[in-house]
Structures are given as structure tokens and as C-alpha cells.
Amino acid sequence: DGGITQSPKYLFRKEGQNVTLSCEQNLNHDAMYWYRQDPGQGLRLIYYSQIVNDFQKGDIAEGYSVSREKKESFPLTVTSAQKNPTAFYLCASSRGLAGNTGELFFGEGSRLTVL
Amino acid sequence: AQSVTQPDIHITVSEGASLELRCNYSYGATPYLFWYVQSPGQGLQLLLKYFSGDTLVQGIKGFEAEFKRSQSSFNLRKPSVHWSDAAEYFCAVGADSNYQLIWGAGTKLIIKP
């Protein structure tokens, strides 16, 4: 079945450590997204990529980095510069621009806790 | 600026009762409107969407939503809820040629047995 796979599902990190969250899709979608979800705040866009080897900052990119070397993969690194990294992270993909088609396909999320 | 407001942080409904979740948006033109559902600890799934045409749209799982331009609203409804509908519901607005959706803060639906 086609879909989006995020790993790990749960991750604990000590302060000062970088961590990388994996996101893989087999839907053949061009666009991929990373969102951060905090209680009561909805979804906030961290980075998005419309095509391989290209990506743009979203609303809250500070302290995060991404790469898009393959169409299927869009890993997110949470760096030590992110001041409040404890959150639920969601990866998504879409066939075209999200605002146009509206249909985002989501992974099951990764919950990061900083100790 | 575009914005989406979901006035109710959480709503409690008895199983079998009807449901209406409110969504108001602020946007200069006719927006594209969406409702997504998120089960606990999971990703989001698209319930339904409105682009144009008939203002009453049908979605999956027996949900429907009505676009009311005069009220800038896109409320989600279901005639009879089931315990499996307990989840968080998000309203979102998009625009043609836009790379992202603007999200509401979500409404958590609690079902009483």
C-alpha cells in the first residue's frame, strides 16, 4: 500500500544534541512538508519541498534543517539551536501544491521529547 | 492575512446525537476549504473539501460541510455520531498556487456513551 512512513515514532533527546527524523513516501508525490504540532496551536509549517534538491522555509524554520536528495525522502534535523523542540512532528506529501489540491497525505508522526 | 478560527477547543456529544463543528475563515477571495480528522497519536486524514460549486459537500465517514460565504463559515456536520468519531478535527484554508494550508487550532470531539 502507498503511504508515508515516519520514524522513529518516539524519540528522546538530551539538550544540545541534534536529531534527525525520517520521512519516506512511496506515493510518487512531488511535494513534501514538515509540520510541527503543539497542543492548541494547530499545525505550523517548518519546511516544504516542491521538487528534488529544492526546499523552502516555512513559518518556523529556525533551528531546523532538511534535505531532499531523493523524491521519496525528506528528512528533518532538529538542531541544538531549536529552543523548544519537544513536540509532535508530522510529515506530509501532496501531488501538487497543497493550497491548490488541498489533499495532504500524512505520516503517523514522530513525538520528540527533550530531557 | 488569511486566518482560520475554530471557536470550540473541545465539544462533548452523546453517541447517536448530531454534531456541528464550527469553522470561520478570513480570506480576501473565495478560498479552498478543508476539514481533516486526527485520531490520537496519528497523522491527519482529509474528510472533505470545497473548491467551488455546490456549497454543501459530502465527505467520508458520513460527514458533510456547508460553505456560507456571507458568514465566512465552513461548518462540519454529522447527523449521528459514533464512538469512533472521537478525534480532533481541523479546518484549513488554502488558495490556488499556494504551497501551504492555513490551519485552525482544532476542535477535540469527545463522545459520551
Image: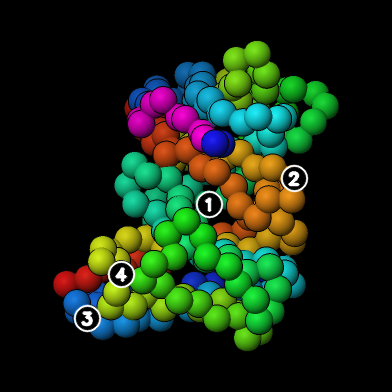
* Type of amino acid at the residue the image marks with label 3: Gly
Q: Earlier in the sequence, mark 3 or mark 4?
A: 3
Residue receiving disc 2: B96
Cβ atoms under marks 1 and 2 closer than 8 Å? no
Is B8 contained in the magenta span? Answer: yes
Task: Please indicate whether residue B77 sits to the left or right of residue B96 in the image.
Answer: left
In the figure, A102 relative to B16: above or below? Answer: below
Chain of the residue on which disc 4 is drawn:
A
At horizontal 41% and vertical 25% (from top left) the residue drawn is B7
Q: How many marks?
A: 4
Chain of the residue on which disc 1 is drawn:
B
Is B104 contained in the magenta span? Answer: no
Mark 3 lies on a secondary structure that is loop
- The answer to whether dots 1 and 2 both sit on one chain is yes
At horizontal 65% and vertical 76% (from top left) the residue drawn is A54
Q: Magenta span covers which residues?
A: B3-10
- The answer to whether dots 1 and 3 both sit on one chain is no
Q: Quadrant of the C terminus of chain B?
A: top left
Expressed as whole percent of the image width and height from the top left, the position of residue A96 reads 75, 59
Q: Quadrant of the rendered structure where residue B65 is?
A: top right
Residue receiving disc 3: A16
Mark 1 lies on a secondary structure that is strand
Chain of the residue on which disc 2 is drawn:
B
Residue receiving disc 1: B44
Q: Quadrant of the rendered structure where residue A19 is?
A: bottom left
Residue receiving disc 4: A82
* Type of amino acid at the residue the image marks with label 4: Gln
* Type of amino acid at the residue the image marks with label 1: Leu
* Type of amino acid at the residue the image marks with label 2: Asp
